[in-house]
Amino acid sequence: MTIHFRTVQRPLSGSALAALTLLTTQSIALAHVTLATGEARTGTYYKAVLQVPHGCDGTATQSIRVQIPEGVIGVKPMPKPGWTLSITRGAYAKSYQSHGKAVTEGPKEIVWSGGSLSDDNYDEFVFTSFLAGDFQPGQSVAFPTVQQCAKGETRWDQIATDGQNPHSLKSPAPALRIVADSVTTGQAQMDHSKMGQGQAAAAPSGNDTYKIGDLVVVSPWTRATPGGARIAGGYLKVTNNGTSADRLTGATTASADRVEIHEMSMTDGVMKMRPLADGLTIKPGETVELKPGGFHMMFMDIKQPLKQGETLKATLTFEKAGKLDVRFNVNAIGAGAGAAPAHKH
């Protein structure tokens, strides 16, 4: 008896087609020098991990040269055993603020050389940085890279135009996509509970704006916390429209045992956090932003989990202006967070 088989061809389902597209895209990407983390937010620390999957035409990689784009500052590369590390510094096109100081120059190019990475092996080249530029959501920030090998080189320096798929390029530059900050703000409400007790009432002027004397505080916010969490961060902007400096010396809230003002900074590739015992100075005409990865408040030993959509009432204390009642909008867990190295106290 002869059995005949008939092949039935069916169109791929949407999910199957999507999976196939993803696999194809990943295969193409793995053939390029790419960044392990391809998305980040402006105003955050970013740990760049360059993935090198192969050599040049079968020969070993002997040098990796990376150009640092404008707006990426505070760059610190990680040394690699067996490789020589060199950094070319230069002037920025504009001045950037870092921990209250103007930064006008820094690393513009990093080179790891003198090593030998076989075509059969994979390795990573790492540096930390801060995204200080005026990058917009959806913008691509390219890090043109030259891979020098025992025979020849590959220049990963092609940059996709608007709307162009970078995977269509033969030698695309490793690129970082800027994503939107998920912080959302709601309409603040006045807290009159302490009026008549020698304190200024929080007087909103527009959404989440509070004024006291020459100071203007804008958009206080915090993040929702998971069950069991004992601390939460507090963020805002404060502008000094006066002619003399003032200082944010502390804060209080019924929702936590105490509030501290902290600063985060990068030291030897490690994010460290320290309390500012003397508070935070706001100079005349200056706007200071408390945000993830920089200056911020810490609500210590919170009484109960913070839930998205709620508000946290607090009182800010300024050395000269006095006390100001505000409300911190509670946003989603992870709101405003960016890719950054692990930190420690």
Image (tube, rainbow, N blue to C red):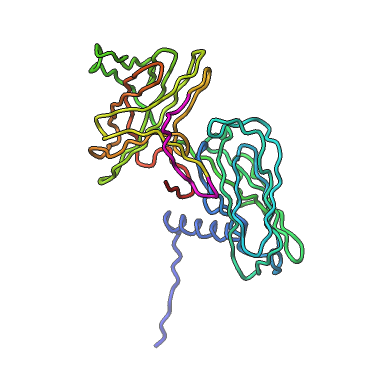
Q: Nearer the viewer, residue 139 or 333?
A: 333
Side of 249 relative to 258 (left or right): right
Count of numbered marks: 0
**Residue 209 falls in which quadrant of the image?**
top left
Residue interval drawn in magenta: 267-281
Question: Which residue is at a point 44% across and 26% down the rendered structure image?
Answer: 237
The percent position of residue 172, horizontal first and vertical second, equals: 65, 51
Q: Is residue 15 above or below residue 200?
A: below
Q: Residue furthest right?
A: 152
Side of 158 relative to 283 (left or right): right
**Residue 12 falls in which quadrant of the image?**
bottom left
Question: Which residue is at a point 56% across and 61% down the rendered structure image?
Answer: 27
135 is within the stretch colored magenta:
no
Q: Nearer the viewer, residue 130 or 26?
A: 130
Q: Residue furthest front?
A: 278
Question: Which residue is at a point 73% across and 63% down the rendered structure image?
Answer: 149
The percent position of residue 14, horizontal first and vertical second, equals: 43, 54
Q: Residue furthest bottom?
A: 1
- Looking at the figure, which quarter contains the N terminus? bottom left
Q: Main secondary structure of the magenta part?
A: strand
268 is within the stretch colored magenta:
yes
Question: Which residue is at a point 53% across and 46% down the rendered structure image?
Answer: 267
The percent position of residue 46, horizontal first and vertical second, equals: 53, 45
Q: Is residue 261 above or below residue 205?
A: below
The percent position of residue 327, horizontal first and vertical second, equals: 32, 25
